[in-house]
Amino acid sequence: MSMLRAEPAEGGRAATRDLTFGQAIKEALAHEMRRDPRVFIIGEDVAEAGTVFKVLAGLVEEFGAKRVLDSPISEAGITGIGVGAAMTGMRPVVDIMFGDFITLAMDQIVNQAAKVQPEPARVARPRPGTEGRAPLHPGRRQGAARDRDPRR
């Protein structure tokens, strides 16, 4: 079993303690969830089961089912929820059960989360007499729909 040695942050003479990686992860998550109400955990079997390795056992009792969420078996869906929640200001912790399954979420990680740029909220309102325009490419301001009136 892998162990970590926890040292006092201030460099004082407090006693050190040995922790497993799982214990350190659980303590860090609990600390952040106490500090920031925007933090939540989502994944397969994270709430009632506390993950397959019981790393998160007890967090649902402390923080409730609204902040420790069991999800359906869909790594892409779980990661997409996390990306969307982060875009709205939440601080999601997405738990993927096994590292082998992370590739199932690569579209959300590489093509969505990595390319999101913070922008102020805007409401697009078409001008009278025009069609709406939808971005065709995120880097260009071209649209698939063009104005029918070539004089504009």
Image: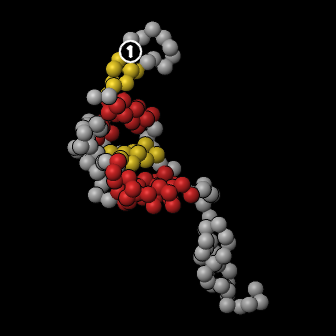
x 50%, y 14%: residue: 11
Residue 48 screen position, x and y as percent: 23, 44
Q: How are the residues colored?
A: secondary structure
Q: Is residue 29 left or right of residue 115?
A: left
What's the residue at 34%, 31% (across, down)?
Answer: 21
Q: Closer to the camera, 115 or 134?
A: 115
Which residue reaches farthest top? 13
Quick one: quadrant of the N terminus? Answer: top left
User: Which residue is label 1 attached to?
Assistant: 16
Q: Amino acid at mark 1?
A: Thr
Within 10 Å of the Cα at label 1, are there few (<14), some (14-19), or many (20+) other Cα atoms?
Answer: few
Residue 66 visible in the shown view: no
Helix, strand or loop for disc 1: loop
Quadrant position of residue 4:
top left
Q: Where is the C terminus found, in terms of image quarters?
A: bottom right
Q: Residue furthest right?
A: 151
